[in-house]
Amino acid sequence: MHIVTLFIWFILYSIIGWIYETIFCSIKKLSWDNRGMLIGPYCPIYGVGAVLDVLLCSSLPNGRSVFFACMLGSAVLEYVTSYATERMFHAVWWDYSRLPFNIHGRICLSCSLGFGFAGLIVLYGLHPFVSRLTAPIPHELQELAALVFMAVFAADCALTADSLAQINTKLEAAVQAIDSQIAEKYSHFIENTRQNLSEGIDSLKEKISLEEYRERRTKEEVRKTLSDLNWVQTRLMRTSISFPRTAYSEMGSRVKHALSFGHKKKKQNESSPDETISDKQERN
């Protein structure tokens, strides 16, 4: 089996995986959910899993062995992919922590069982059609298509990696800016308290206001971070990405929430163009 054909299968199954993920998650959320860690309409983990399914499971004696091989193989693939992407980008795209029988939130029993059944569907249902689709294509044309796909895919991977690095830098900088200003304000509060202990009530009020000040500064940094995001970074932040084991995990969640809220607010405004200025002022 030629490597060019395998790569074309990888791209096709990655697109099919993206379509499945997007439809399933959009129905689950009752709103559009553009899945995948890359910009293009494909989920590489599905492409890798499907191609490995075809290569390694075609010679297995029956469907039961295919099911267990796909179930165990998908668990290994998911865990390794989750661990590797988190180490490289400090980000995760799926978290099964709330589901029973999970391991570090990276894999869980129910999803592995689902991928076991998916392996049967791919091997006995989808792949005969995909192989018949690609078989008549001349090898030279397959090579040309593979080169085009590879160029687009490589550019997408490079752009996504660069965008993720910039997102991490911006979120970390926002948290450091807040912490620095909070530390400066708290030092000022301590100094004032030492100099004038008789004004204990005023000092207490100032101490309480630190939390309000942090919240105000956080909102300012969220707005600043949003304004600094380009289209690619905004698209990535609108996926299921999160930064659970970083110092800027909360900041990432706040930025994602602000993006989601802004999108919903924009849709509401578009659906009610006759809203008066006074109505908007009252809501704000």
Image: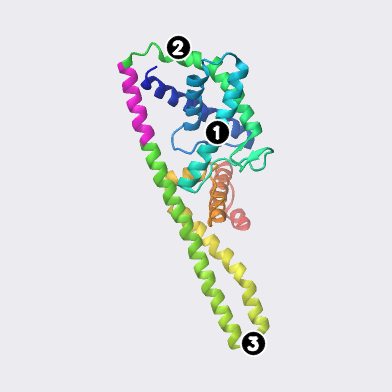
Which residue is disc 3 drawn over?
197
Mark positioned earlier in the residue sequence (3 or 2): 2
Magenta segment main secondary structure? helix
Residue type of the residue flagged with mark 3: Leu
> In front here: 165 or 199?
165
Residue type of the residue flagged with mark 1: Val
Residue type of the residue flagged with mark 2: Arg
Q: Is residue 147 above or below residue 98?
A: above
Is residue 71 toward the left or the right of residue 12 in the image? right
Q: Is 153 colored magenta in this rendering?
A: yes
The magenta stretch spans which residues? 140-154
Which residue is disc 2 drawn over?
132
Alpha carbon separation for disc pair 1 and 2: 30 Å
Which residue is disc 1 drawn over?
76
Alpha carbon separation for disc pair 3 and 2: 84 Å
Point out residue 105 in the picture as x, y percentages from the top left corner.
Answer: 61, 42
Using a 10 Å C-alpha cutoff, classify the residue at mark 2 as few (fewer than 14 neighbours), some (14 to 19) or many (20 or more).
few
Q: Secondary structure at mark 3?
A: helix
Point out residue 170 in the picture as x, y percentages from the top left corner.
Answer: 45, 55
Alpha carbon separation for disc pair 3 and 1: 62 Å
Q: Is residue 105 above or below residue 8?
A: below
Count of number-bearing discs:
3
Using a 10 Å C-alpha cutoff, classify the residue at mark 3 as few (fewer than 14 neighbours), some (14 to 19) or many (20 or more).
few
Q: Is residue 40 above or below residue 127?
A: below
Q: Is residue 187 above or below residue 236?
A: below
Quadrant in which the N terminus appears: top left
Residue at screen point 48% across, 39% down: 37
- In the rendered structure, are the residues bearing label 1 and label 2 in contact, judged by CB atoms less than 8 Å apart? no
Res. 43 visible in picture: no
Using a 10 Å C-alpha cutoff, classify the residue at mark 1 as few (fewer than 14 neighbours), some (14 to 19) or many (20 or more).
some
